[in-house]
Image (cartoon, rainbow, N blue to C red):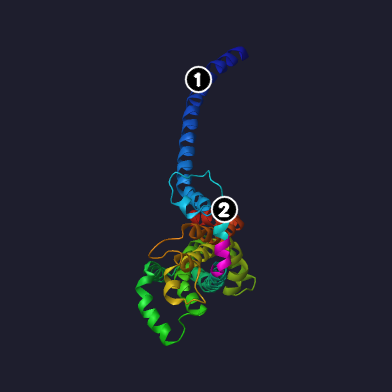
Amino acid sequence: MSAIVSSRTQETTPGTRAPQALNQPKRSAGSWVRGIAITLVSLVFVLPLIWMFAAAFKTNVQVTDPSVGLWFTPTMENFRSVLKAGLILKSMTNSLIIGVLSTLLSAIIAVPAAWAVGRFRMHRAGSLILVARIIPGISLLVPWYYLFSQAGMVGSYTVLVLSHMFVSVPLILWIMISFFEGLPVELEEAARTDGLSAFGAFWRISLPLAAPGTATASLLAFVFSWNNFMFALIFADEHTQTVPVTLFNFISYASTDWGGLMAAATLITLPVLLAAVLGQKYLVAGLTSGASKG
């Protein structure tokens, strides 16, 4: 009897393994296709950065010469001239001050507001936030400039921080709403049963759990502030201009200093890349968590 069972098992085993063997080539082909697609998409985003980094070590003649690729004799003259002028370091300091202040103040305002909207289901408030998020900032430049000029604030750090907060607050708030909506309300109810107030439950329970989302939203808001050109062009002066405005100064009517422009662009890109690398853990966790909760 056992011999019959074993023979039947041997007969059915190849039949059960055949579909798996047939599916293995399909899986490997699919993985190859995904790998090629990821490589192509990565090249689209990485090649401009590689070209920028390489052009920073070329002369203006080499930058504009299509025959000069990645094989050339590098020079540090572009970095010397940019650093010697001193404008890039000053503008980087201004951008850092404005970016940190606007992001910090925006997070202080937006994170508790996102918790209130998400926890108490304020859908109308969420719709108003979305409207504020999609309003183009350029439509507000004229009234803003009139009001801030009348108040004597044009050219100060305050006006730049406030103008950046107009975008950063809705950005952080809209991202954080989904995080707080995805947190179990039972945790806050248990904390309130233990004697905590509503804000105490938010501060001690919900806020630590939403730390990845807060880090992600804050990093995106800082990147926006660092790269913003329009507000700084209108509201800043020679003492408070930020890095995008300084880059714009390398372009003149007659010619463009491509080597200096690429060197300055490389210098201002490094802090953002460093922040992304250092915050990669929270950034990936925040993006995946927001995707699953939203």
**Circle on res. 75:** 2
Give the mark toward the camera: 2 or 1.
2
Does residue 39 belong to the magenta stretch?
no
Q: Is residue 188 left or right of residue 237?
A: right
Residue 234: in sight, yes or no? yes
Indicate the quadrant where residue 189 lies.
bottom right
Q: Is residue 81 magenta?
A: yes
Residue 79: assigned label: none
Name the residue carrying label 1: 15
Amino acid marked by disc 1: Gly
- Residue 285 location (% of width, % of height): 56, 55
Q: Residue 196 appears in which quarter of the rendering?
A: bottom right
Residue placed at 44% from the left, 66% from the top? 248
Q: Position of residue 195 (x, y in %)?
A: 64, 74
Which secondary structure type mostly characterizes the magenta part of the structure?
A: helix
Question: Is residue 294 at least partly visible in the picture?
Answer: no
Front-lying residue, 283 or 79: 79
What is the three-letter code of the residue carrying label 2?
Thr
Question: What secondary structure is found at the residue carrying circle 2?
Answer: loop
Q: Earlier in the sequence, mark 2 or mark 1?
A: 1
Q: CA distance from mark 2 to mark 1?
A: 67 Å
Q: Residue at x 49, y 35 (%)?
A: 31
Quarter that holds the N terminus: top right
Q: Considering only vertical position in the picture, is 264 above or below 100?
A: above
Residue 11: horizontal and vertical position, in percent? 53, 15
Magenta highlight range? 80-87
- The secondary structure type at the circle numbered 1 is helix
Q: Residues within 10 Å of mark 1 (few under 14, many from 20)?
A: few
Residue 118: x and y in percent read 48, 66
